[in-house]
Amino acid sequence: MSAVRTTSRLGTIKSLTPRPLLNMADVSTRAFGLGTVANRPGPDFLIIGTKRGGTTSLFNYLMQHPGILGTFPRIRSRKSTNFFFADHPASPYWHRSHFHTEGYRRLLETRLGYRPLGFEASPYYIWDPRVAPIAAKLYPELKAIVLLRDPVRRAWSHYQERVQNGVEPLSFTQALQVEDQRLSNEVDRMMANATYHSTAHDWYSYRTRGEYLAQIVNWRRHFPPEQLLILRSESLYTNTQAVMDDTCAFLDIPSYELPHTTVFNATWRTREEMPPSDMSVLSRHFSSHKKLLEEYLKMEFQWS
């Protein structure tokens, strides 16, 4: 059975299973995972962002690969453990309980001819400056993948999602005008308190979250450049297989021809366009940021 059919079938089973049974299954599998944690390595790699940049799509494309396991149990198709979230205190043992055992990997390696990989994905991991040093301390050999999207369009998509979720009462113009006020001192509070999760920093960082350079520099401060892959979000959708090939090469596993390249988590693509005045303001703001980013990464980005 192909990887995509298996993933689809598991997703169907999960959607048809009553919530109480899923909760019971989660408790039992987590207990089993913790009981066998000595035989469970942590993740081989992470997809760390950016938000509204294609993280969900890349996660689903990689889950079609026969040599990529995701998290344990596979039937949950769990994108993220949220382990690195400040307000989600858990031990490294709990985190490792979410990844497949060495025994299972060796069994699969015999069939595949190469070691299968485990991973998780969260666009918040690049945005919270506390995540990189924790990840480096626990998993120094970890690889990380970043998708960078046109920050103007990313900001608009982020705003639309917040409106859809019922947590943004302001217009986009108003939200941009008060963003600095909303985020004032939030990073300082985060750095001073390891358990403080800033909702404002997460939800309302429409413009600031598109200032990518500082976020990448932070990860490179803790991981060597060869352990960080930078991808263009636009390329993920216009040339999906090529991006998949580049990703597999980075992960040092054979490439895999995708059975399909459906776009995931794109519910807002059909909504109204960004107000032209806001587009103009953001384009001017990001012009210098784009130049510095290109110089630092030695990459070109065809952004507005």
Image (cartoon, rainbow, N blue to C red):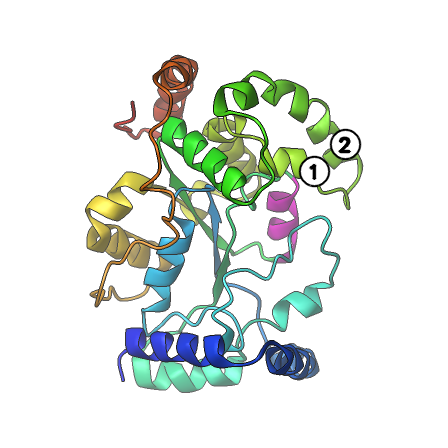
Determine the main secondary structure of the stretch shown in magenta: helix
Residue pictured at 53% horizontal, 44% vertical: 223
Range of magenta residues = 130-138
Residue 121 to residue 269: above or below: below
SS at mark 1? loop
Between disc 1 and disc 2, the foreground one is 1
Residue 94 spot, x, y in % from top left: 69, 69
Q: CA distance from mark 1 to mark 2?
A: 8 Å
Within 10 Å of the Cα at label 1, are there few (<14), some (14-19), or many (20+) other Cα atoms? some
Amino acid type at circle 1 is Ser
Quarter placement of the C terminus = top left
Evaluate whether residue 252 shows in this view.
Answer: no
Query: In the image shown, does 40 or 127 lie closer to the viewer?
Result: 127
Precedes in sequence: disc 1 or disc 2: 2
Image spot of residue 112 (x, y percent): 31, 80
Q: Which mark is residue 211?
A: none
Q: Please name the residue shown 37% across and 31% down the image.
A: 153
**Rendered residue at 47%/70% (across/down):** 77
Amino acid at pointer 2: Arg
Q: Where is 239 relative to 298, above or below?
A: below
Is residue 295 shown left or right of residue 222?
left
Q: What residue did someone put label 1 on?
A: 198
Asked if the residue at tag 2 contacts the one at tag 1, i.e. Cβ–Cβ closer than 8 Å, the answer is yes
Q: Nearer the viewer, residue 35 or 282?
A: 282
Relative to 274, 133 lies left or right: right
Rendered image quadrant of residue 132? top right
* Magenta span includes 132: yes
Task: Depth check: give the residue in front, 136 or 199.
Answer: 199
Q: Quadrant of residue 271?
A: top left
Q: Which residue is mark 2?
A: 189
x%, y% of residue 154? 41, 34
